[in-house]
Image: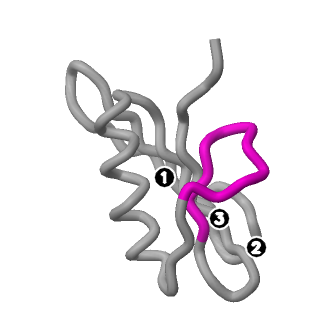
Amino acid sequence: MTSKAQHVVPQAGKWSVRKAGSARSTSVHATQDEAIKAATAIARNYGTELYIHGEDGRIRERNTFGENHAQSKR
């Protein structure tokens, strides 16, 4: 089974939304906030996790969406 977790990552001065394990972007945004909104909608739809990376590429926040409710770990 393939992970449908979404990642918000920096990409050439913009912010990219990518599915876990994919080299291709689902979408690219001018700001991190725009990318987070787009990735949150996808993660909620699939009931999966969202990983938000900082400008250094390291994970700074993780949100889990599923049957129970959204949970955030920073």
What kind of element bears circle 2?
A: loop
Disc ID at residue 9? 3
Q: Earlier in the sequence, mark 1 or mark 3?
A: 3
Please tell me whether residue 17 belongs to the stretch shown in magenta. Answer: yes
At label 1, the amino acid type is Arg
Mark 1 vs mark 3, CA separation in Å: 16 Å
What kind of element bears circle 3?
A: strand
Labels 1, 2: front one:
2
Residue 50: x percent and y percent?
48, 45
Residue drawn at the location 39% of the way across and 40% of the way down:
43
Residue 52: x percent and y percent?
54, 58
Please tell me whether residue 42 belongs to the stretch shown in magenta. Answer: no
Q: Nearer the viewer, residue 5 or 26?
A: 26
CB under 8 Å between discs 1 and 3 = no
Q: Nearer the viewer, residue 33 or 38?
A: 38
Residue range highlighted in magenta = 16-26
At label 2, the amino acid type is Asp
Labels 3, 2: front one:
3
Residue drawn at the location 61% of the way across and 52% of the way down:
18
Reading the image, the residue beneath label 1 is 74
Residue 41: x percent and y percent?
31, 50
Residue 8: x percent and y percent?
57, 60
Is 27 on the left or on the right of 46, as rendered?
Answer: right
Mark 1 vs mark 2, CA separation in Å: 16 Å
Residue drawn at the location 51% of the way across and 54% of the way down:
61
Q: Quadrant of the N terminus?
A: top right
Image height of 51 relative to 29, above or below: above
Q: Give the colour scheme shown.
A: one colour
Reading the image, the residue beneath label 2 is 56
Mark 3 vs mark 2, CA separation in Å: 9 Å
